[in-house]
Image (tube, helix red, strand yellow):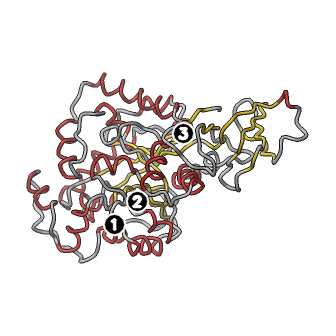
Amino acid sequence: MRKISADFICPVNVPPIPEGVLITDNDGRILAVEPSRSGHDPASLEVHRGIIVPGFVNTHCHLELSHLKGRVATGTSLLPFLYNVVALRETEMQEILEAIARADAEMFEGGIVAVGDISNKTDTVALKDKSRLRYYTFVEMFDFLQDHQAEDTFSSYFEVFEQQSTANGNQKSCVPHAPYTVSRKLFEKTNAANQAGQTISIHNQETPHENALFLDKSGGFIDFYARFGFSLDHFQPGGKTSIHYAMENLRQDTRTLFVHNTTTSIADIQAAQAWNPQVFWATCPNANLYIENRLPVYQYFLDTGAKVTIGTDSLTSNWQLSILEEMKTIARFQSYVTFDTLLRWATLNGAEALGFEQDFGSLEPGKKPGVLLLEGMEPAFRLTTGTSVRRLL
């Protein structure tokens, strides 16, 4: 048994507790969260300076792209970024596997306990089978809006899906990549492959060009498709933003995780939440800055009561895989988002989005959520550039 105390304990599900005591068994399962150190033998307590929080949940990563760290230029905007990633994907397998292992270890050391991970291949399966992290693998499919390719596309990716890890509580689902790359027929195929209550991830409104395509068939995706040899002659814009195309074609009985949401409006958020009460919004601020030099307007999500989660994206589009660094970026550029809000986004909301809330996301009896110590905070719960995280359990 361990009794751990700090200046504050932030269970997330209830308000912060000054000088509270967290009691766990030797395996890290929470036995109790007590409001005071009184009644405890001081010699039995581990007392820390800082704030105790549950482990972080990274709801969006591309672990299999870890070998591309530093190889794609920053600030190019999304379409040139995608060209570069496609050109760089072929690498020696040993280099890929070593980079995957390093990235997994980096996330563990940074306090992450669970990850929503995009996969197009089976490169990460062996690592996930033995990892100290829990993974929800999203096998991502795309046919570039070509209905006639949907059947073959689905078949090839379903073989990848069947091999994904389900060890140690890991989960998996078949998911569409983004509105601009998935035909209605391929949506039908992915929908049929999943079950009610699963989580579905889809990239959403990461660049203004995406909405332009669906509003009036304009913007950079016209040249993007031509460059890869795909015709858009058959495509008819719906006169609505891209998220509406996604909602028309996704199941409503699953948790839906919209990812990036850089250009998402209040009207888009309201429409999605009316469509499905199990909607979550993953933000990857450092990746947004790396690629597009812009961030979502987080006030829109606060005003609509949206359930926001935090992801890191991949090392192709980020300098590190750290949820704490993502929180710092939001706090630096949109400081009206409070620490309490950021912490919920980084923990409990993420756990709920992945369906892992029975074990992760908050410091509650019965859970085994990981226990972290945040050090170097300013008074009044303010993150600084010097704030660091240390894993206690």
Q: Nearer the viewer, residue 127 or 331?
A: 331
- Residue at 52% across, 51% down: 354
Which of marks 1 and 3 precedes in the sequence? 1
The image position of residue 283, as x and y in percent, is 42, 54
Numbered disc 3: secondary structure: loop
141 versus 183 height, above or below: above
Q: Which residue is label 3 attached to?
A: 387
- Nearest to the eye among marks 2 and 1: give it: 2
Most distant residue in the front direction: 379
- C-alpha span from label 3 to label 1: 38 Å
- Residue at 60% across, 55% down: 340
- Nearest to the eye among marks 3 and 2: give it: 3
Do the residues bearing badges 2 and 1 touch, measured as CB atoms within 8 Å?
Answer: yes
38 versus 45 height, above or below: below
The image position of residue 306, as x and y in percent, is 50, 66
Q: Which residue is label 2 attached to?
A: 258
**Residue 368 falls in which quadrant of the image?**
top right
Most distant residue in the top direction: 94
Q: Amino acid at mark 3?
A: Thr
Q: Which residue is label 1 attached to?
A: 246
- Residue at 40% across, 50% down: 284
- Judge from the rendering whether residue 155 lies leftward or rightward of residue 227; answer left or right: right
Tag shown at residue 33: none
Q: Nearer the viewer, residue 227 or 199?
A: 227
Q: Nearer the viewer, residue 288 or 333?
A: 333
